[in-house]
């Protein structure tokens, strides 16, 4: 379910399937809220899309509920993704480092209406390089790290001989 654009303030989650054309991305899921991040009282998150007992979308749960025309039969963590959180008028975009740039920031500001009229004083972006936001672009780096660990084990083993 992709919501239509309007002028309300939102937090939520997103995926970027084409990092060369972020503005074309249509996989974003909004949660209506105020400038403190508190959810609109009329809005309910589908239990299948959230973390247990949470008022937030869960990337994995929501992805698994999407039609294959959106997912291309890929796992939830294949494409770069991110989350928009709001607290005390500050919007924070947490995302894969591969998409942490001004183009993404402007796209998120537009899709989630992160503007001063909605009480937003600042929008910041945090490139999260942790395992939480890994995607297909990390595969080469991941394999290089794994190979390096194997080489270290082998050289340590050789030194004991």
Image (cartoon, rainbow, N blue to C red):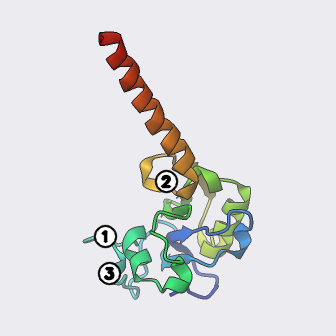
| Label 2 packing within 10 angstroms: few (<14), some (14-19), many (20+) | many
Is residue 65 toward the left or the right of residue 94 in the image? left
Residue 58 shows up from this direction: no
Q: In this view, does 87 lie above or below 15?
A: above
* SS label for mark 2: loop
- Left or right of 141 on screen, residue 105: right
Q: Using the image, determine if residue 138 lies above or below residue 30.
A: above
CA gap, disc 3 to disc 2? 23 Å
Q: In the rendered image, which quarter is residue 75 located in? A: bottom left
Q: Are marks 3 and 1 in contact (CB under 8 Å)?
A: no
Label 3: which secondary element: helix
| Front residue of this view, candidates 8 and 153 | 153
Identified at 50% across, 69% down, the residue is: 13
Give the mark nearer the N terminus: 2 vs 1.
1
Above or below residue 67? Residue 120 is above
For the C terminus, the image quarter is top left
Q: Name the residue under label 3.
A: 48
**Label 2, on which residue?**
134
**Crowd class of label 1 (few under 14; some 14 to 19; many from 20; radius 10 Å):** some
**Depth check: 23 or 85 in front?**
23
How dense is the environment of label 3, judged by Cα within 10 Å: few (below 14), some, or many (20 and up)?
Answer: few
**Residue behind mark 1:** 51
For image coordinates 36% across by 85% down, the residue present is: 44
């Amino acid at each position: 379910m992709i919501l239509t654009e309007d002028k309300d303030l939102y937090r939520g989650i997103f995926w970027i399937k084409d990092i060369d054309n972020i503005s074309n991305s249509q996989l974003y899921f909004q949660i209506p809220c105020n400038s403190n991040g508190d959810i609109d009282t009329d809005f309910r998150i589908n239990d299948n899309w959230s973390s247990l007992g949470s008022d937030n979308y869960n990337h994995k749960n929501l992805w698994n509920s999407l039609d294959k025309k959106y997912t291309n039969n890929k796992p939830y963590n294949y494409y770069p993704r991110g989350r928009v959180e709001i607290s005390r008028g500050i919007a924070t975009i947490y995302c894969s480092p591969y998409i942490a740039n001004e183009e993404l920031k402007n796209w998120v500001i537009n899709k989630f209406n992160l503007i001063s009229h909605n009480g937003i004083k600042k929008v910041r972006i945090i490139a999260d390089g942790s395992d939480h936001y890994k995607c297909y672009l990390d595969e080469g780096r991941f394999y290089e790290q794994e190979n390096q660990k194997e080489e270290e084990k082998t050289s340590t083993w050789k030194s004991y001989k």
